[in-house]
Image (cartoon, grey):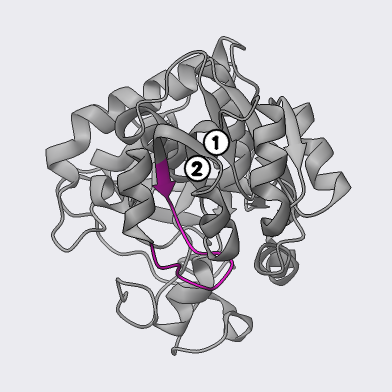
Amino acid sequence: MREPGYQALVCTHWGDWRDLSMRRVERVALRPGQVRIRVCHAGVGYAVRLFVSGKYQRKPPLPFTPGTEVSGVVIEVAEGAGHLRVGQRVMAALDWGAFAEEAVASATTVYPVPDGIALGSAAALPITYATAWAALEWRAGLRPGETLLVHGASGSLGMAAVQIGRHMGASVIATASTPEKRQAALAHGASHALGSDADRLAADVKALTGRQGVDVVFDPVGGDLFDASLRCVRPQARVLAIGFAAGRIPTVPVNLLLVKNIALIGFNYGLYIGWGLTDEREQHAMAVQGMVAKCTGAIAARAMPPPLTRHFAFTDWEEAIGTTMSRRSVGKVIIDIGGT
């Protein structure tokens, strides 16, 4: 007879992600405003390492299941979540709990998956693609005809920025570390692809832009590439600081911002989905729902390609997370947990 509960990847103590263990866990009752999702696919992000080590800005109560992006089918709806229904195909941004056969989500951060988008693609959208779209539209105000420089362009977030920037009408210059990764960026919307050599970046970018520089920088890498970015932007450019995958948090020569009228914009998508110092997800829910609908609508209408994904079986979770941590992946790593 099948044991009660469901299978999940569990963190029992703060430490290395390799210490996670697969086990059966019991269902918890839904609270008002929540839904239960049968998870088909879960996205793997670099932040899982920080979550399980206890170094992320939010600490889940132990034990917990990591993972924040899922797609699947609604199997239970609590009071106060009436805009969702049992059997509906959805994707969700979770506080945690994605690496499991079932997940509980706040209905505020659950989004319908339109016909024409496979659930395997949808698992990359509710945080990764939403982050890139919101940063480029809400904060940078990217306009058609502008030039966008995207660092880490073969990773899940960088690739999303390449595709979304192209969809918004920008000319995209991508940076990536290997020929294979640069080719992937070119195949998915970049007009040009450069190496990740910070010493050459300004000269290479200005050669491509006729010495004018770029209008917007999308930077999830930080470190030396951030420093170099300030030397390859045109006056009144906008620089989006998204993250620090390179490991070094750069310092900013403010005189450079002043001389060229550069706007340096920090962006934390978590603010909009309840991950800030206070939970503001309800305050931003309408804007986020509208933005996510624009993104999914563009993909469903084939105005923008679906996410580039690499899939692993649930039993291969260690390889999936390891591929993400080592930055070997091109596009988004997805764990296939159940269903289609």
Report the side of 5 relative to 41 (left or right): left
Would you place residue 206 above or below residue 38 in this image?
Answer: above
Work out whether 304 lies above or below 104. above
Asked whether the viewer can see residue 251, the reply is yes
Q: Which sits in the foreground, 297 or 28?
A: 297
Q: Residue at x 56, y 33 (%)?
A: 213
Q: Is residue 173 above or below residue 177?
A: above
Q: Position of residue 266 (x, y in %)?
A: 33, 51
Q: Residue furthest right?
A: 179
**242 in magenta:** yes
Amino acid type, residue under disc 2 in the picture: Phe
Disc 2: which residue: 218
> Residue 249's x, y, as percent?
45, 70
Q: Residue at x 44, y 88 (%)?
A: 14
Locate the N terminus by quadrant.
Answer: bottom right
Residue 175 in the image: state x and y as whole percent.
69, 45
How crowded pointer 1 is (Cα within 10 Å; few <14, some 14-19, many 20+) is rated as many
User: How many numbered circles does the render carry?
Assistant: 2
For mark 2, does the 10 Å Cα neighbourhood hold few (<14), some (14 to 19), or many (20 or more) residues?
many
Q: Badges 1 and 2: C-beta atoms under 8 Å apart?
A: yes
Q: Is residue 221 left or right of residue 253?
A: right
Looking at the figure, which quarter contains the C terminus? top right
- Report the residue at 24% width, 40% height from top: 108
Callout 1: SS = helix
Return the residue at label 1: 161
Span colored in magenta? 239-252
Look at 67% across and 57% down and name the residue there: 198
**Whole-number angstrom distance, CA of label 1 to CA of label 2:** 7 Å
Which badge, 1 or 2, is on the more N-terminal residue? Answer: 1
Label 2: state its secondary structure: strand
Q: Quadrant of residue 64?
A: bottom left
Pick the residue in front: 314 or 57. Answer: 57
